[in-house]
Image (spheres, coloured by chain):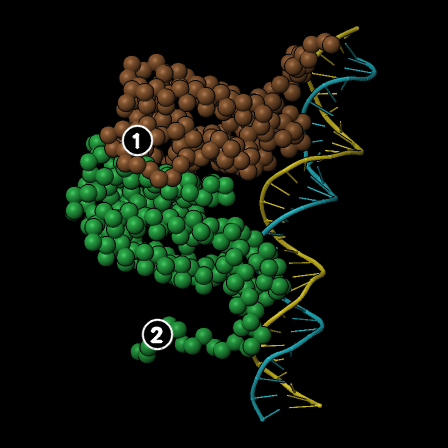
Chain colours: A brown, B green, C yellow, D cyan
Amino acid sequence: MHQPDPAPTPKPLRADAARNRDKLLVAATEVFGERGLDASLEEIARRAGVSIGTLYNHFPTREAFWDAIFPERLAALERVMESALAAPDPWDGFVGYLEGLFALQAEDHGLNDALAQRFRAAGEVEQACHRGFRRAERIIQRARDSGQLRPDFEPEDLVTLIWAMSQVIRESMATAPDTWRRCLAFFLDGLRAGAAHPVAVPPLTPGQLSEVMRAR
Amino acid sequence: MHQPDPAPTPKPLRADAARNRDKLLVAATEVFGERGLDASLEEIARRAGVSIGTLYNHFPTREAFWDAIFPERLAALERVMESALAAPDPWDGFVGYLEGLFALQAEDHGLNDALAQRFRAAGEVEQACHRGFRRAERIIQRARDSGQLRPDFEPEDLVTLIWAMSQVIRESMATAPDTWRRCLAFFLDGLRAGAAHPVAVPPLTPGQLSEVMRAR
DNA sequence: GGCTAACTTGAGGTATTCCTCAACTTGCGT
DNA sequence: ACGCAAGTTGAGGAATACCTCAAGTTAGCC
């Protein structure tokens, strides 16, 4: 029984290959950011100034790009969550989290698609989403415990909210990039404990949640 | 100067042609309802048991189907709006309108796409949407005047809400068909006058609104 | 029954995107 | 400066969807 050795220095690339890989990554970040996760791979190759064959040589699947691109964006999201948890006021932290989250989605169509689960994430990204969800749970719990966030708002409702806002962002960013902020403001007013009226419908169960994630 | 004669009895169809047209319409209603407005036309022909050529003979464009299908659905929506305006309590009318609207969207992916402007509507449908918007304005105005709906909720915000809910419906209907009701309940709690906090961002201007509509 | 206009058919052209692979080119160790 | 492993290339196969049109079929009138 020897070590599985999951990342054994992934062999050094030749200079030209490393350059092409970088150009592809830059192009992919741009194109996915502008066009969303279903952007054409041919366009990425074109913008990188590289043939489609070279693209497939470096990134054999669309998901391989995502694994290379998203960790940085997800790290930004983690920083947002950190500062949300560090905020003196739990409600301010909760609001700051949502604003930071959607601001990130708004500036990157690809991240918007990914977080709205419009595309099934690969292993790497899925893991990060899972970790992110656990931390979001704490932000929500903290705001509920302080008595400011309505007590019937569950972490699963965050997923629904992300779906909702992702579409507002998709439709409005090109024309009126502040629209999502107004929509969020209305929604937040409904999440304050003082505003709460009884809600008849239960949240997504964890089972339903993972089914929806699996669906796409 | 003679009459423009906009609908001069659109020539009677041969019996077999009329039958095929019906089969196509039934199939199209099903397929667009299940798959959304970007469903494959070949699948419609297949399900109607008719060749692709016949489909194009009767409905030369995708939009021609919409013009034939949507008037009935939009009439259902008008009935929802009628009863919203007839409700004794303006807030109940407003809530009933939104619930009726989204219930219709939930049972028809095609209507969901159409109302969310995911696809540019053809003349017929666009007219109906315009009329619908005018009536929605009255429902909103009435609820605001009664002091129950927050005064800063504008008709343009309804468009944003439809975007938001359309995505919740798209993602959740297959797995947890009540999810949109819970989301709407949260949102409605933020729309009550008592819940309102000042919102910094202005609504879409009419100009932005029509630009977004034109965009797709 | 026969004729004709109305209707149907589906192969095939166009376009887009994905992905592969045999032939070519080039970085780099020696 | 040579040779080869590493890397690049782009034509082209496969899949999917759109749409057209020349040839074939049929409803319905006489």
Q: Residue at 27% across / 29% down in the picture? A: A192
Q: Nearer the viewer, mark 2 or mark 1?
A: 1
Q: Is residue A4 visible?
A: yes
CA gap, disc 2 and disc 1: 55 Å
Tell me where residue A3 appears, x and y as whole percent. Answer: 69, 9
Q: Amino acid at mark 2?
A: Pro
Q: Residue at 39% across / 15% down in the picture? A: A82
Q: Chain of mark 2?
A: B
Splitting the image into 4 quarters, where does residue A149 fall? Answer: top left
Residue with the mark numbered 1:
A191
Residue with the mark numbered 2:
B4
Q: Residue at 62% across / 59% down in the picture? A: B46
Q: Residue at 42% across / 43% down in the picture? A: B178
Splitting the image into 4 quarters, where does residue A169 fall? Answer: top left
Tell me where residue B13 appears, x and y as whole percent. Answer: 52, 76
> What mark, if any, has residue B6 been given in the picture?
none
Looking at the image, residue B166 lies above or below residue A78: below
- Circle 1 — which element? helix
Q: Amino acid at mark 1?
A: Leu
Tell me where residue B107 appears, x and y as whole percent. Answer: 44, 51
